[in-house]
Amino acid sequence: MASPVFFNKTALFPDLDDNQHMILCQAQSTSASLGFILTISTLVCKIWKFYKDKAYAQSKVVSNLQLCSAIIASFGVDVGLQLLIKLLYPLNVTTKQISEEVDVTDPNHVTVYYVRICTTGDQLIPLIITVVDKAVLLLLGLFWTIEIRQASFKAHEEEQLIAISIYNVLIFASCGLILSLLLQNATPTECYVISSTLIICCAIFTWIIIFTPKVLFILKSRNKDTEDREKPNFDTALTDLSSNASLERYVGKVPEELLDEHIRLKEQLTKLQIMVQAQRRGVRGAEKEQEQESITVIET
């Protein structure tokens, strides 16, 4: 916000005539439209690629060439619409008076403040043509984003950030469109202050949404690592208790209830092992007796 004030007060740039002002207006409107459509088409095509790859796993995966072709096609459509607007509704530089200031010492000396703006005469139809392709892309991106959020497959972090970006662009673009319609008769200062405030709020809100989960994840990871380091390792202690040589080292570290339970389970395990060995011996003895009886029968 300080940059325009600085350039205005220092007068680094000379005053522009109508032709130069016309060139700047056309460059501003064209670059804003093409930059916006390029950003939106990239986000929407990325979310479309993810939707096709996950929802239709049996079909052919969307290649990078197809992705770039879709972005270029969207960009080309917007270029065509901008050329159509320039041909049907050419820009005109008009002067709009803001206020007058009468000199106190000389009433005949009046300072008139004015601003030069670029208009097309009929503002509604060019605005509709400019918005139509971007609205279609945003609605498609919103549809695929909702489908992904309601789907059974899990979205990666990149796709989640793209979905958040599409939501933000849709909401804030709608706010900007409404403000542009409401501030048509406002002063340049009011337009500048309100527009700058909206842009700053949008940027801060987007940063909060994107980076807050990351910061919380890092803090939780650090707290978990600290708890894991401070928590006594009872599993290692109980494992080492199976060795009688290290029993005395962990008597003071392991709770008495766990120690008694471990000893009881160890005794039960020993009894079960003895019973299994006895059963195996009995089975082997019975097999040997059957073999001897069969040999005796054959000899007789």
Image (cartoon, helix red, strand yellow):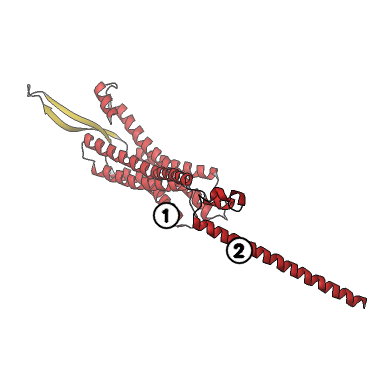
Query: Of discs 2 and 1, which sits in the foreground?
Result: 2
Relative to 294, is 81 on the left or the right? left
* 206 or 49: nearer the viewer: 206
| Residue 272 horizontal side relative to residue 172, left or right | right
Specify the label residue 65 is tagged with: none
Residue 193 visible from this viewpoint: yes
Q: Earlier in the sequence, mark 2 or mark 1?
A: 1
- Residue at image coords 38%, 46%: 134
Residue extending farthest to the right is: 300
Residue 42: image x %, image y %? 45, 43
Instruction: Looking at the picture, tell me which residue is in the foreground, 182 or 195.
Output: 195
Marks 2 and 1, how far apart in space? 58 Å
Q: List the residue tagged with mark 2.
A: 268
> How far across and down, in percent of the image, does residue 280 sit?
73, 67
Is residue 129 rendered to the left or right of residue 74? left
Left or right of residue 179: residue 258:
right
Q: Nearer the viewer, residue 190 or 32?
A: 190
**Badge 2 amino acid:** Gln
Numbered disc total: 2
Task: Tell me: residue 3, above or below residue 121.
Answer: above
Give the crowd class for mark 2: few <14, some 14-19, many >=20 residues within 10 Å: few
- Residue at 36% x, 43% y: name it: 208
Q: Secondary structure at mark 1?
A: helix
| Residue 31 horizontal/vertical position (percent) | 38, 35
Residue 161 position in % (x across, y down): 43, 45
Image quarter in which the C terminus is found: bottom right
Q: Residue at x 25, y 25 (%)?
A: 8
The front one of 205 and 109 is 205
Number of residues whose C-alpha sits closer than 10 Å to that of mark 1, classed few (under 14), some (14–19) or many (20 or more):
few
Rendered view: 73 above or below 274:
above
Name the kind of residue labelled 1 in the image.
Ile
Which residue is labeled 1 in the image? 146
